[in-house]
Amino acid sequence: MSNTEKKSVKPPRLMQGDTVGIVAPAGPFDPKKFMKGKAVLESMGFRTFFDEGIFQKHGFFAGTDVQRGDQVNRLFADPAIRAVVCARGGYGSMRILPFLDFETIQKNPKIFVGFSDISVLLSVLNDRCGLVTFHGPVVTTLANAIKETIAAMCAVLTSNTILELKPEKGIVIKPGVSSGIMAGGNLTTLCHLVGTPYAPRFNGKILFIEDVGEVPYRIDRMLVQMKLAGCFEGLKGLVLGSFEECGQLDEIFRIVQEMFKDVNIPILAGFEIGHSKINITIPIGLEATLDTDRQILTFYEPATVKISK
């Protein structure tokens, strides 16, 4: 059953003193940045926990596929852990998909945060488990994050805030108003799921995409591949985040406009989400409305639920 056919499961809200588990499902990371980012999480009022095994290096990865998958499974199974934040993206998240215990994860819904390569896990956990996940900073990017990024992350994870995002410099690519379940993440990473059992489908959804270091022709190629694979059938709207080091933004916007010229959906660019100076945390799997007239993306309800301890 796809996530469009099941009710999304919102994880318990974080409270002061809760323990946040840190996992490394992808690439190895700079220990100094890690410890600095860990201190940022603690400055928000949380305890932190991590297994020393996350400092392993195995080729391109922070440990073997089995080890990294087991880290995720154990943090979800541990009742003392109230949220899971990824240490870094890089590359490797899709390699652990066969080793994830989706039944355990579904029975123990928790906040799960990351971006970039972690988009694989945000998408698949939402699709397979119905879990609302969070596209937001990883521990190593928190190390040098500006106050807007930190405040946005803390607000979404700890309060009953109903999120409204209005880009400072919004660009309307196609006008309109539409509602749907929020989906998406890093374009390159999502494209790599095409042809696998975990391939994304965005029927009835508002898709968010961002990327870094991909020149326009490669962005075009990825969008074409996903379109030909049927990923965009039934799409309700498109939100563009940051496209850092991807060439001229005007060219990217032209590619997007051309790609979706035959569908009547709103498309709004300019959101500070992704590999940019500001990386606003947004929920994946929660219903939202995209309104290009007002240049705003509005969610209907808080992304977490309050649970009495």
Image (cartoon, grey):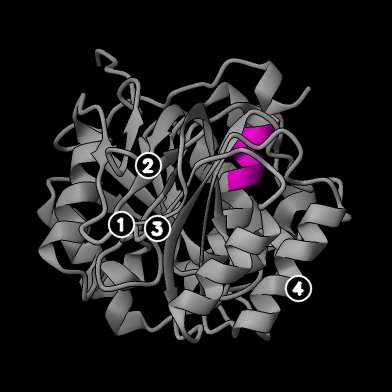
Query: Three-letter amino acid code at disc 2?
Result: Thr
Whether the residues at callouts 1 and 3 have beta carbons within 8 Å, the answer is no
Whether the residues at callouts 3 and 4 have beta carbons within 8 Å, the answer is no
Tag 4 secondary structure? helix
Mark 2 closeness class: few <14, some 14–19, many ≥20 residues within 10 Å: many
Q: Which residue is mark 3?
A: 50
The residues tagged by marks 2 and 1 sit, at their Cα atoms, a distance apart of 9 Å
The residue that appears at 23% across and 73% down in the rendered structure is: 143
Task: Please give left or right for residue 168 compared with residue 296 in the image.
Answer: left
Q: Is residue 177 above or below residue 30?
A: above
Task: Please give left or right for residue 10 compared with residue 192 in the image.
Answer: left
Of badges 2 and 3, the one in the foreground is: 2
Q: Give residue 140's position: percent from left, percent from top.
A: 34, 72
Q: Which residue is mark 4?
A: 221
Magenta stretch, residue numbers? 123-127
Q: Is residue 244 magenta?
A: no
Q: Give residue 34's position: percent from left, percent from top.
A: 32, 73
Of badges 1 and 3, the one in the foreground is: 1
The residue that appears at 67% across and 52% down in the rendered structure is: 261
Which is nearer the N-term, disc 2 or disc 3? 3
